[in-house]
Image: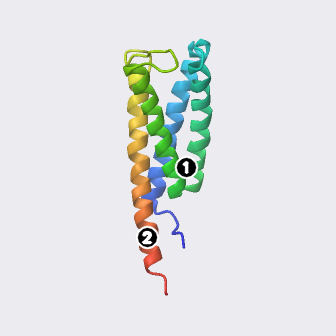
Amino acid sequence: MVAPPSPVSTVLCLVGGVLLVVSSVIHLHLWSTGYRHIPTIGPLFLLQGIVGIVLALLVGVTRRVWAALLGALFAASTIGGLLLSVEVGLFGFKDSLSAPDATLSLVVESAALVVLAAAVLLGSHRTHAVGSRLPA
């Protein structure tokens, strides 16, 4: 049996969803102001923006562990993509943390990762606790 989301899980999922939307808006803004002209990176920024918004809605509407986990993994992959691009380059493009909105993006995505990971941990614990009380 799956427990209904607790009030704390609900808040964590909603905050995590908002953070995913903010990250997506940053990427869509950067795409529209010039990144769209960068081969491979441009389409990936557009894809990140769209997928992030869809995941944010999924997390906020369902408030389930699996959705929060998807959102957390998405935030982690976005962080990984930025750091990889800064450190070694990605698809022939090398970014910088001094680029417009790079640091803001890193902070927002890190916060989304932490908040959604907390939702996953809380939700997993709650599901396990409810399941253990079921009659045999």
**Where is residue 111 shown, x and y percent of the image?**
39, 39
| Residue 17 vertical position relative to residue 102 in the rendered view, above or below | below
Q: Which mark is residue 117?
A: none
**Scheme by which the image is coloured:** rainbow
Q: Say which residue label 2 marks.
A: 128
Question: What separation in Å lies between label 1 and label 2 (alpha carbons)?
Answer: 20 Å
Which structural element holds mark 1? Answer: helix
Q: Nearer the viewer, residue 47 or 16?
A: 47
Taking the image as shown, residue 51 lies to the left or right of residue 15, namely: right
Find residue 80 and report its image quarter. top left
Taking the image as shown, residue 121 lies to the left or right of residue 33, namely: left
Find residue 55 and report its image quarter. top right
**Where is residue 130 shown, x and y percent of the image?**
46, 74
Residue at 44%, 38% in the rendered image: 76
Find residue 89 and report its image quarter. top left
Q: Residue furthest bottom?
A: 136
Amino acid at circle 2: His
Amino acid at circle 1: Val
Q: Say which residue label 1 marks.
A: 59
Sort mark 2 into few (<14), some (14-19) or many (20+) by Cα contacts within 10 Å.
Answer: some
Which structural element holds mark 2? Answer: helix
Q: Are marks 1 and 2 in contact (CB under 8 Å)?
A: no
**Where is residue 104 shown, x and y percent of the image?**
40, 26
Q: Earlier in the sequence, mark 1 or mark 2?
A: 1
**Where is residue 122 shown, x and y percent of the image?**
40, 60
| Quadrant showing the N terminus | bottom right
Residue at 43%, 32% in the rendered image: 79
Sort mark 1 into few (<14), some (14-19) or many (20+) by Cα contacts within 10 Å.
Answer: many
